[in-house]
Amino acid sequence: MYTCIIVEDEELPRLSLKSKLETYHPDIEILAMCEDAESALECILRNRPQILFLDIQLPGQNSIWLLEQLQQTGKLPRIIFTTAYTDPEYLLKAIRFSATDYLNKPINIVELAQAIEKAKKRIQEEKEIKHASQKNIYSFRMLNSRLIASEEDIVYIEADGNYAQIQLLHDKKELIFERLGDIEKRLNSPAFIRAGRSLIINKNYIRKLNSKTSTCSLVTPNASYHLPIPKGVCDTLKAQLS
């Protein structure tokens, strides 16, 4: 079973979505239905649903305010936006909060099913990531798949705009569709050290820190890497490793 909350201020769309879920998706338990952002915030924090069906246009505080409040309290549920508007601005806002999907009202049952399948897939992926991280095995989002890597597999990770490049043990580099800061939060091993704004290093591969050239040398059985790092960071790492 999966759990959800519906946030929709208009009665007919709210009841219509409820009916579609009960008829076509009996494995989705509706925990509550809310008509505004303020009551939805309290309800979501109390029930912690896995999926949130959220109308963008709400009376009073809007849905973006609601998501900003939820974001401050921890992990967001899987968000499926529902709206009668097709303004691209709303789509950009949906992307900002990593929305699972964006459905136009009246909601088509085929599109609803597709959105729910996406949400279920991401929920399952999150469970796998949590399970893997407890064993120092990590899952990273790539373009069309996921990269599974152990602590020993990861030599370093560097920021690449809104994404990251991960250098693996066997001299292989992969593009990860995640921000470096988000990756850092999941690396629960003391082996990983943040080396400035754009770099995370596996300290087990550090062989030399050179303050004069502001570089860090990493050596693996297959290759060596010389990474530029700020002098202050270099001195800090030396102190930590001494």
Image (cartoon, rainbow, N blue to C red):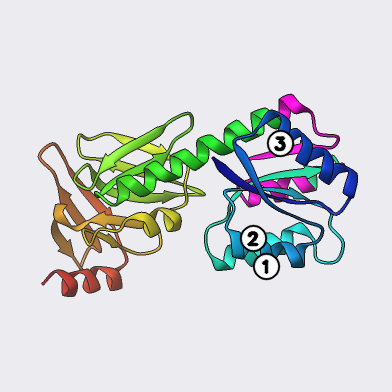
Residue 207 at what x, y percent from top left? 11, 56
Residue 47 image position (x, y, % from top left): 60, 59
72 to the left or right of 216: right
**Per the image, is 183 magenta?**
no
- In the shown orientation, is residue 13 left or right of residue 193? right
Task: Find numbered disc 3 in the image and state the secondary structure of the residue it sits on.
Answer: helix
* Label 1 crowd bin: few (<14), some (14–19), many (20+), radius 10 Å: few
Residue that extends furthest to the top in the rendered view of this protein: 110
Residue plotted at (30% across, 58% down):
188
Q: Is residue 196 visible?
A: yes
Q: Earlier in the sequence, mark 3 or mark 1?
A: 3
Q: Is residue 135 above or below residue 197?
A: above
Label drawn at residue 44: 2
Label 2 with label 3: CB-CB less than 8 Å: no
Asked where in the image residue 141 lies, by quadrant, the reply is: top left
The span picked out in magenta is: 90-111
Residue 53 vs residue 27, the one in the foreground: 27
Which is nearer the N-term, disc 2 or disc 3?
Answer: 3
Residue at the spot of label 1: 42
| Residue depicted at 89% across the width and 43% down the height | 12
* Amino acid at the residue labelled 1: Glu
Q: Amino acid at mark 3?
A: Leu
Report the residue marked by disc 3.
21
Q: Is residue 94 magenta?
A: yes
Frontmost residue, 23 versus 34: 23
